[in-house]
Image: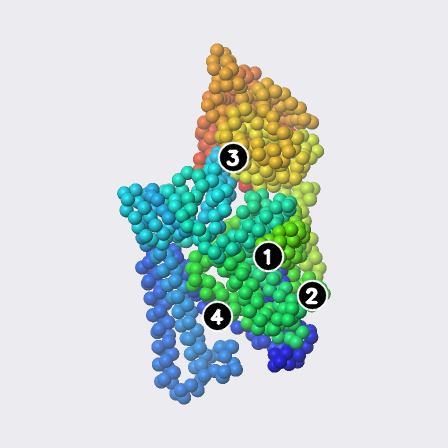
């Protein structure tokens, strides 16, 4: 009754904003709207949390004695400050005369005896928290160096282990290493509890390891493992690849057979696994994007999310929606309790009062939901971080007081860092804390500023939240991604419209899947619509020509972006006619993102009009484009990554690809094929006859079949014509063929490269050699003695030192183009090759320094236009 009478005295306006860590809603209420004065924000816990965080980040990467030294120094400093304070307090005149009144303890006086005492106490607290953070990190790091596992890892020893699974299994992302594609392996975190060495010695221990399972027939069984399952694994240990990793060793399992299970998971994990499996079954009937995203959004199950969809979310800064975040829990708590500030009012919001729950029972129900959230989503560090952020939002929902949220966030950070010091080095943890802090501090002020300028309330809140989160998180993303997303803010605004219905329906489907599957499938179908909208926003945003802006990486790049962001934010407040300036800035940003082809060409000069041939900048690989008239082009090779080749084709305005020629099956030529197929009409894919390496040839077949594109084989002597293009296949020659009395076998994939002699618009002649090695180049010269000088030569094998001088003398190119990756480990292109080409009169351009290259004209009008590296 007392709470209801107190709440009844409040005005109806200003119940505050919907609070939520990592959501588009604002957090807390401004004092002018809430009807009560909260005073300045209480920041006393912030330096304590920051000190523990910094100390833990330092201590997990140093040796034990350095950690002990740091802890001792912090404790000694804190003790000295406290002793000095006690001495001054006892010896000072008047005793406690300088004490701060109880009602004024929220602020520290700027001077005086009391101010000095409080500052001394505050610094002592900072040092004590730093000591605690360093001590926790030092103890955790010491565990990694204790026992037989680290010793065996240094010896790269082989043994048999008993391992307790501590995370969900996951697949590694396909990566290109040189000319090969790294196999997709199963990776999971585990804890070694028993070691049986080859000499028969047995050791009991507890050492966290990263378990890597190579590809094999048992992959599906590995992916179904639940945390707390105990396995018996044979394999070889290796040290972690980087210092400061949260495991003692990397355990590479022998073979790829099914796991040998020696202990079932506990009841809690079995229950969580059954619920998660039920949600996966309920989503089986949805389209591919919704089927992949809904389990990730609800319970953090990202096993169905492919690289292409993940790339789209990364390009639009929507990765927080791919897995569990505090927003999931916040939305459910909002549904239960209602808007912030209403928990103490007579007419409370949410479902709780409508089903007869008292205030205390409602608080317990919120706590129960939080506990269930942790159980179902697995109590690993990322889920605990999300739960902590959700608890901060729970406090906001219950009180509507912004002033109490910052100490709650700082306390959550302090507890989590002490519990798991490895979080101190986690970019995900840093982004979560920064986003939540921005929503609690910056977003409400920016929202008020937007309202004063006539922006509607809800739109002002959502826009301010997106701007604040992006402003503080973008510099961190730049540190490790070396790019800035220009579509992040609108993408987050549009995606946020669908997050709440998708989350609520997804959690309902999760709960019903164990009771009544048809109802769960119906709710999953409903949730599929908003989830599909989120996927559409990500894919559409990432497909825009200017979705991402290259930016210097590393801490200096992040600092530069942070300074630029702060300058823009401060300058925007002082500019006259800010409305007009804002409209102009938005228009310029829109043009930068959409990049209409005429405007882009006018601003950058690339691609030049009437380009005939282009070499894309795809890193250490090959991707070239032959203009076939209008928006059509023939693509020769696809590079090692789908993203850069897709971006290159978009910049060139290519929408139709009548033919894709893959010269051979090395990964640096074929792994980017999905990027060529993305959003384009493709007629056919032509390949060489030697299907080696088999795994990469199978990848091409799967990708072509999935896109419904037929595959054909290049035949020697074959002639084709498409629009202004005509070409002849010069190589590969049949293995058993004989020319000039010799057998001409090719020994590997490089020598099987499809080689084309092309005649383009205006009579431009091009010779595309793929990755031919000198023996095949010499055979090519013998088989085709009529080879004449050409305008453009695509230098074989990224300009390696292995070239046939007689072939280069025969074709005498006017322009030699080399596709190579910047700072590649192979020394491509070779200085000897470049010198020989220049000695023959060729102008040499290379993508690692000149960027993408476009060729215009022919004969005397031949011009090469580099974009710039």
Residue at image position (62%, 66%) is 336
Q: How is the image coloured?
A: rainbow
**Which is in the foreground here, disc 3 or disc 1?**
1
Please state which of residues 389 and 463 is positioned toward the viewer in this rendering: 389
Q: Quadrant of the N terminus?
A: bottom right
Q: CA distance from mark 3 to mark 4?
A: 51 Å
Residue at image position (49%, 45%) is 223
Total count of labels: 4
In the rendered image, which residue does mark 1 sit on? 511
Residue 33 visible? The answer is no
In the rendered image, which residue does mark 3 sit on? 668
Tag 3 and tag 4, C-beta contact below 8 Å: no
Q: For the residue labelled by badge 1, is the local secondary structure a helix, a strand or a loop?
A: helix
Residue at image position (64%, 75%) is 345
Mark 4 burial class by Cα count in 10 Å: few <14, some 14-19, many 20+: some
In the rendered image, which residue does mark 2 sit on? 457
Q: CA distance from mark 2 to mark 1?
A: 34 Å
Please state which of residues 168 and 321 is positioned toward the viewer in this rendering: 168
**Which is in the foreground here, disc 1 or disc 4?**
1
Q: Earlier in the sequence, mark 2 or mark 3?
A: 2
Q: Earlier in the sequence, mark 3 or mark 4?
A: 4
Q: Quadrant of the C terminus?
A: top right
| Place of residue 865 in the rendered image (x, y in percent of width and height, measured from the top left) | 60, 36
Q: For the residue labelled by badge 4, is the local secondary structure a helix, a strand or a loop?
A: helix
């Amino acid at each position: 009754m007392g709470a209801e009478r107190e709440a009844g005295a409040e005005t109806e306006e200003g119940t505050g904003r919907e609070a939520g860590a990592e959501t588009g809603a604002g957090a807390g209420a401004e004092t002018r709207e809430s009807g009560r004065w909260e005073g300045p924000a209480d920041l006393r816990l912030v330096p304590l949390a920051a000190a523990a965080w910094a100390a833990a980040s330092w201590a997990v990467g140093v040796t034990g004695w350095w950690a002990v030294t740091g802890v001792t120094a912090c404790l000694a400093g804190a003790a000295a400050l406290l002793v000095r304070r006690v001495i001054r307090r006892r010896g000072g005149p008047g005793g406690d005369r300088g004490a701060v009144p109880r009602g004024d303890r929220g602020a520290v006086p700027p001077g005086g005896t009391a101010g000095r005492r409080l500052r001394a106490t505050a610094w002592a607290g900072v040092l004590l928290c730093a000591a605690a953070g360093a001590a926790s990190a030092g103890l955790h790091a010491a565990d990694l160096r204790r026992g037989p596992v680290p010793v065996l890892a240094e010896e790269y020893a082989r043994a048999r282990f008993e391992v307790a699974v501590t995370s969900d299994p996951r697949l590694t992302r396909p990566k290109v290493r040189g000319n090969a594609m790294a196999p997709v392996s199963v990776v999971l975190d585990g804890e070694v509890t028993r070691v049986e060495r080859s000499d028969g010695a047995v050791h009991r221990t507890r050492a966290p390891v990263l378990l890597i399972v190579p590809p094999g027939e048992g992959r599906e069984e590995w992916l179904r493992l639940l945390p707390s399952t105990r396995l018996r694994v044979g394999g070889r240990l290796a040290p972690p690849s980087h210092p400061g990793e949260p495991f003692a060793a990397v355990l590479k399992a022998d073979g790829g057979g099914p796991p040998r299970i020696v202990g079932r998971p506990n009841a809690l994990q079995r229950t969580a696994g059954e619920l998660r499996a039920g949600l996966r079954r309920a989503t089986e009937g949805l389209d591919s994007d919704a089927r992949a995203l809904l389990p990730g959004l609800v319970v953090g199950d990202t096993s169905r999310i492919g690289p292409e969809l993940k790339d789209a979310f990364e390009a639009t800064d929507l990765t927080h929606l791919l897995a569990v975040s505090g927003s999931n829990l916040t939305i459910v708590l909002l549904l239960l309790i209602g808007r912030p500030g209403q928990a103490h009012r007579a007419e409370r919001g949410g479902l709780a009062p409508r089903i007869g729950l008292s205030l205390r029972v409602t608080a317990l129900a919120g706590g129960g939901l939080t506990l269930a959230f942790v159980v179902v989503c697995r109590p690993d560090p990322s889920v605990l971080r999300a739960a902590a952020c959700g608890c901060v939002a729970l406090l906001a929902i219950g009180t509507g007081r912004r002033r109490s949220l910052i100490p709650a966030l700082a306390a959550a950070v302090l507890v989590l860092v002490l519990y798991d010091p490895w979080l101190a080095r986690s970019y995900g943890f840093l982004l979560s804390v920064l986003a939540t802090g921005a929503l609690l501090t910056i977003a409400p002020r920016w929202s008020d500023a937007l309202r004063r300028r006539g922006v509607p309330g809800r739109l002002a809140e959502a826009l301010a939240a997106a701007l604040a989160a992006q402003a503080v998180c973008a510099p961190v993303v730049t540190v490790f991604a070396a790019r800035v997303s220009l579509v992040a803010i609108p993408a987050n605004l549009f995606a946020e419209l669908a997050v709440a219905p998708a989350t609520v329906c997804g959690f309902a489907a999760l709960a019903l899947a164990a009771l009544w599957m048809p109802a769960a499938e119906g709710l999953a179908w409903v949730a599929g619509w908003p989830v599909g909208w989120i996927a559409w926003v990500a894919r559409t945003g990432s497909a825009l020509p200017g979705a991402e802006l290259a930016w210097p990486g590393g801490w200096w790049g992040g600092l530069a972006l942070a300074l630029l962001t702060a300058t823009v934010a401060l300058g925007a407040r002082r500019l006259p006619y800010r409305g007009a300036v804002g409209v102009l800035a938005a228009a310029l940003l829109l043009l930068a993102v959409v990049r209409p082809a005429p405007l882009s060409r006018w601003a950058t000069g690339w691609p030049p009009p009437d380009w005939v041939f282009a070499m894309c900048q795809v890193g250490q690989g090959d991707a070239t484009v032959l203009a076939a008239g209008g928006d059509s082009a023939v693509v020769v090779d696809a590079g090692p990554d789908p993203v850069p080749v897709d971006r290159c084709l978009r910049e060139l305005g290519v929408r139709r690809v009548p033919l894709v020629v893959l010269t051979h099956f090395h990964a640096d030529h074929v792994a980017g094929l999905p990027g060529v197929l993305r959003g384009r009409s493709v007629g056919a894919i032509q390949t060489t006859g030697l299907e080696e390496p088999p795994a990469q040839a199978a990848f091409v077949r799967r990708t072509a079949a999935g896109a419904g594109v037929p595959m054909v084989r290049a035949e020697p002597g074959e002639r084709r014509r498409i629009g202004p293009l005509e070409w002849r296949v010069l190589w590969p020659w049949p293995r058993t063929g004989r020319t000039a009395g010799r057998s001409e076998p090719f020994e590997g994939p490089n020598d099987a490269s499809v080689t084309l002699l092309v005649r383009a618009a205006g009579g431009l002649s091009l010779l595309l050699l793929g990755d031919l090695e000198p023996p095949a180049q010499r055979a090519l010269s013998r088989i085709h003695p009529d080879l004449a000088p050409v305008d453009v030569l695509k230098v074989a094998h990224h300009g390696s030192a292995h070239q046939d001088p007689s072939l280069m003398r025969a074709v005498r190119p006017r322009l030699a183009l080399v596709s190579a990756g910047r700072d590649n480990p192979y020394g491509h292109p070779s200085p000897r090759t470049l010198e020989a080409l220049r000695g023959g009169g060729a102008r040499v351009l290379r993508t690692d320094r000149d960027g993408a290259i476009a060729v215009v004209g022919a004969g005397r009008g031949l011009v090469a236009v580099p974009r710039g590296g």
